[in-house]
Amino acid sequence: MKHGLAIAPTSPTLRPITRVEDLVSQGLVTVDAGEALQPVVDRFQLRITPEIAALIERDTADGPIRSQFIPDERELIIQANELKDPIGDDAHSPVRGITHRYPDRVLLKPTHLCQVYCRFCFRREKVGSGAEQLSDAELDVALAYIADHPEIFEVILTGGDPFVLSDRRLAKIFDGLQSIPHVAVVRLHTRVATVDPDRITPDLIRILRRRFATWIGVHVNHVSELTTAASDAIARLVDAGFPLVSQTVLLRGVNDRVDTLTDLMRALVRLRVKPYYLHHLDFAEGTSHFRVPLDVGKRLVADLRGQLTGLAQPTYILDIPGGFGKVPIEPDWVEKVSERHYRVRDWQGRIHDYEDI
Ligand SMILES: *Cc1c(COP(=O)(O)O)cnc(C)c1O
Ligand code: SF4
């Protein structure tokens, strides 16, 4: 809408890409490659914003932005260990739009639409389907569920991407949450601040500012996503007083190197965003070409520990398949050798004996 109306509506480069034809006409894939991608796009939605398309134009053939957003024939390879609901959202859904897995917090998913569809998304079976928008009545039921559960301290708006909602719809949700006294924190997880930075407007910021603490989690996987426009959008949110955290998915060929992760985490801290989670990739269908072995991930985060300020350290996270929750994956720093004796590895790999009380 913003791109269509506010800025030159005739320029095809200013509209999101949603079809293989658009990829071809914008020169992002060849005609032949486009034909081979049609079955992929029939299976998993395609959407790329103009901001991301501009980054892809400058990227190499297997570069970090291209591979996150341009469909790939390998997505049609579904492995036996891959699941439609890899983290078991459905197992903990008491009413439509709510996932209540931990006592003190719920996910509220008002939409399954996003501004971009990431080729590795853990909810790729759900995202992109218009039918998965909560109706007004369903939203009321979801809010009533939260109101009925005083143990809920935090509501996490995710989806989909909550910032694809209109101001009116977001205001309705925030008004509803505001009227539930035990909701102390509302967190939004979004890619919009970086992939559609114009969405971060003064009106939006006014809607988010409430009696509860509004936290914002931005999903960023590579430093080149932090363009000037994206950085400015992040600065508007931080300047408005919202604490920002980041989430990164560890992806083969995108960010599975110490220097790449270092650049990203430093850039985030410089933008006043606290690196929060580095996610081990979930077993979503057709994502095997992105997988990094857990041992490799452990080595990467151990190396980051020596390389980077503590402010820039994310927690490496595994979401246990089946809906059992998230656990941190730590490098093997401390090994118990006997009753009070431990062997501790420092950041340079040297081993020290430690005698506990
Ligand atoms: C990831 C997740 C959360 C949030 O977990 P934090 O560790 O608090 O970031 C909450 N509920 C569900 C169902 C989740 O998958
Ligand atoms: S923005 Fe988030 S929910 Fe949407 S496709 Fe990407 S990873 Fe999935």
Image: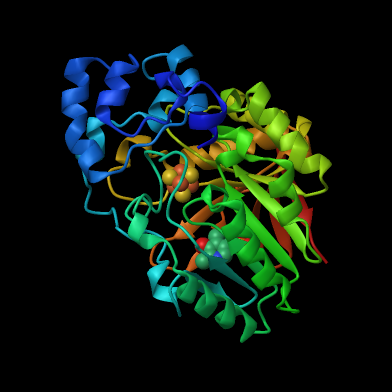
User: Which residue: 66% across, 44% down?
Assistant: 314
In the image, residue 45 sits, relative to residue 169, either above or below, namely: above
Q: Position of residue 326 (x, y in %)?
A: 53, 61
Q: How is the image coloured?
A: rainbow
Q: Position of residue 285 (x, y in %)?
A: 29, 49
Q: Is residue 258 left or right of residue 49?
A: right
Q: Position of residue 331 (x, y in %)?
A: 60, 46
In the image, residue 215 sits, relative to residue 140, either above or below, namely: above
User: Which residue: 32% across, 54% down?
Assistant: 125
The residue most toward the bottom is: 148
Residue 63 showing in the rendered view: no
Q: Is residue 101 left or right of residue 44?
A: right
What quarter of the picture does the C terminus occupy? bottom right
Judge by depth and name the residue closer to the eye, 34 or 198: 198
Toward which corner of the image does residue 222 lie, by quadrant?
top right
Q: Position of residue 158 (x, y in %)?
A: 54, 57
Judge by depth and name the residue closer to the eye, 36 or 142: 142
Judge by depth and name the residue closer to the eye, 202 or 303: 202
Q: Is residue 120 left or right of residue 54?
A: left
Judge by depth and name the residue closer to the eye, 151 or 250: 151
Q: How many marks?
A: 0
In the image, residue 167 sits, relative to residue 23, either above or below, namely: below
Residue 335 showing in the rendered view: yes
User: Which residue: 69% across, 63% down?
Assistant: 186
User: Which residue: 56% across, 34% down?
Assistant: 196
